[in-house]
Image (tube, rainbow, N blue to C red):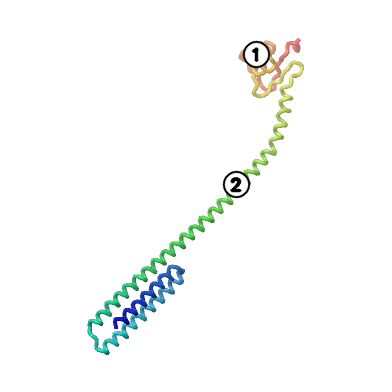
């Protein structure tokens, strides 16, 4: 009788071990199917124990054998509960892994969106820079022409440009500031202004 019970216990242990390995490798759907098989196995185990109890009662065995069977049955039930708890824990871990995967997918989509925005900004900046480069040569060509027209002396006179001073004009033509003031009848406090004609050669006055 004890050998039969031990064989049954070993079979249950082997079934539980193989079921745990399958649950760790399977998805959530496989875990649900494993629970159904577990409950079916537990029901089958209870049915076998009931048959054994009837068999023992029919043969008039001692109460010690019945107590031993009940103890082993209690241990088997405890192991089944532990296995169920382990299955629930595995299911929770897989659900957490699914949540992490979804978060990674969202982060990947955000990074791709940022890359697209950065590419658009780079293209817009390059277009603006090309337009500015295309307009720059025209401005550079016009400025020297204006300077030549303004700064070119005509018959001993000089046309003052914006930002110029008597000191700069005197250095440009090698004439002292005092002489420039004297040639143009300017007081020491007098200021020049753009468009004003200054006499820069004494022979022009003559």
Q: Secondary structure at mark 2?
A: helix
> Residue 182 appears at what percent x and percent y?
67, 10
> Residue 25 appears at what percent x and percent y?
45, 68
Outermost residue on the front side: it is 3
- Name the residue located 73 percent from the left edge and 11 percent from the top edge: 202
Task: Classify residue 38 by image quadrant.
Answer: bottom left
Q: Name the mark on residue 177.
A: 1
1 or 2: mark nearer the eye: 2
- Name the residue located 71 percent from the left edge and 20 percent from the top edge: 159
64 or 113: nearer the viewer = 64
Q: Dot 2, crowdedness within 10 Å: few (<14), some or many (≥20)?
A: few
Q: Count the marks: how many?
A: 2
Outermost residue on the left side: it is 63
The residue indicated by pointer 2 is 121
- Name the residue located 38 percent from the left edge and 77 percent from the top edge: 39
Of pointers 1 and 2, the one earlier in the residue sequence: 2
> Residue 142 appears at what percent x and percent y?
72, 31
Residue 72 against residue 181 in the figure, above or below:
below
Q: Quadrant of the N terminus?
A: bottom left
Q: CA distance from mark 1 to mark 2?
A: 55 Å
Q: Name the mark on residue 138.
A: none
16 or 28: nearer the viewer = 16
Q: Secondary structure at mark 1?
A: helix
- Name the residue located 35 percent from the left edge and 76 percent from the top edge: 10
């Amino acid at each position: 009788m004890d050998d039969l019970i031990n064989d049954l216990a070993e079979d249950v242990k082997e079934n539980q071990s193989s079921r745990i390995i399958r649950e760790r490798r399977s998805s959530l759907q496989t875990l649900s199917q494993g629970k159904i098989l577990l409950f079916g196995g537990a029901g089958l185990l209870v049915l076998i124990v009931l048959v054994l109890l009837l068999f023992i009662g029919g043969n008039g065995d001692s109460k010690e054998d019945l107590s031993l069977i009940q103890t082993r049955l209690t241990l088997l039930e405890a192991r089944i509960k532990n296995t169920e708890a382990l299955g629930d824990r595995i299911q929770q871990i897989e659900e957490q892994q699914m949540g992490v995967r979804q978060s990674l997918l969202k982060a990947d989509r955000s990074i791709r969106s940022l890359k697209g925005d950065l590419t658009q900004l780079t293209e817009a900046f390059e277009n603006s820079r090309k337009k500015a480069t295309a307009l720059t040569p025209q401005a550079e060509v016009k400025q020297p022409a204006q300077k030549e027209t303004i700064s070119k002396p005509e018959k001993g006179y000089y046309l003052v440009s914006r930002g110029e001073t008597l000191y700069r004009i005197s250095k440009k033509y090698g004439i002292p500031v005092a002489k420039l003031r004297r040639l143009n009848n300017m007081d020491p406090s007098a200021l020049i202004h753009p468009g004003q004609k200054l006499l820069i050669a004494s022979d022009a006055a003559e």
